[in-house]
Amino acid sequence: MTDFYLPYNKQLIPRAKELRQNMTMPEKKLWSEYLRHNSFKFMKQRPINNFIVDFYCAKAKLIIEIDGDTHFTNDGIAYDLTRTAILESYGLKVIRFTNHDVIHSFEGVCQAIEKALEIPPPPLNKGASIQAFRK
């Protein structure tokens, strides 16, 4: 359990549930073939702030977004940039893949996620490490 709290709009919960029930083919593939069985726990369609992110791992503070065609319009690109900046302001890391990436480069997508999940160890307290060594 963590003390880390992310705000969310409770009005988005019904929509998030609906999206969980109706995931896109690339989202289903990534979930069923990789994220669902990952040693890190992921949540599908998680409300954060006024957004619903595709996948969220609290331990790694990682958001994974799978982008379809609507993300590549001028409006979609601008919206995603703003959205990403807001999510990153909470200390979250956002990584994005296209539908095409998930379908045609699945192994590469999984490798990129593995790399993003590499959590550096917390810095050692010098006094604590010396004490541990002396024991």
Image (cartoon, grey):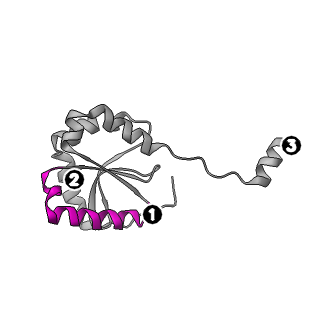
Where residue 16 appears, as percent x and y from the top left, is 23, 56
Magenta-tinted stretch? 68-91
Where residue 35 appears, as percent x and y from the top left, is 34, 38
Label 2 sits on residue: 17
Label 3 sits on residue: 134
Label 1 sits on residue: 5
In depth, the one of 47 and 124 nearer the eye is 124
Q: Main secondary structure of the magenta part?
A: helix
Q: Residue at x 21, y 33 (%)?
A: 104
Q: Residue at x 23, y 40 (%)?
A: 101
| Mark closest to the chain's N terminus, 2 or 1 | 1
Q: Which corner quadrant of the image does residue 99 belong to? A: top left
Magenta stretch: includes residue 84? yes
Q: Is residue 55 visible to us here?
A: yes
As measured in the structure, the alpha-carbon distance from the residue carrying label 3 to the one carrying label 1 is: 38 Å
| Mark closest to the chain's N terminus, 3 or 1 | 1
Q: Residue at x 25, y 62 (%)?
A: 80
* Label 3 Cα neighbours within 10 Å, binned few <14 / some 14-19 / many ≥20: few
Where residue 41 appears, as percent x and y from the top left, is 41, 43
* Label 2 Cα neighbours within 10 Å, binned few <14 / some 14-19 / many ≥20: some
Label at residue 84: none
Where residue 114 appears, as percent x and y from the top left, is 42, 38
Q: Is residue 105 left or right of residue 41?
A: left
* Label 1 Cα neighbours within 10 Å, binned few <14 / some 14-19 / many ≥20: few
Q: Is residue 1 left or right of residue 86?
A: right
As helix, strand or loop, the secondary structure at mark 1 comes to loop
As helix, strand or loop, the secondary structure at mark 3 comes to helix
Give the number of the mark in front: 2 or 1.
1
Give the number of the mark in front: 3 or 1.
3
Q: Is residue 74 left or right of residue 83?
A: left
The amino acid type, in three-letter code, at marker 1 is: Tyr
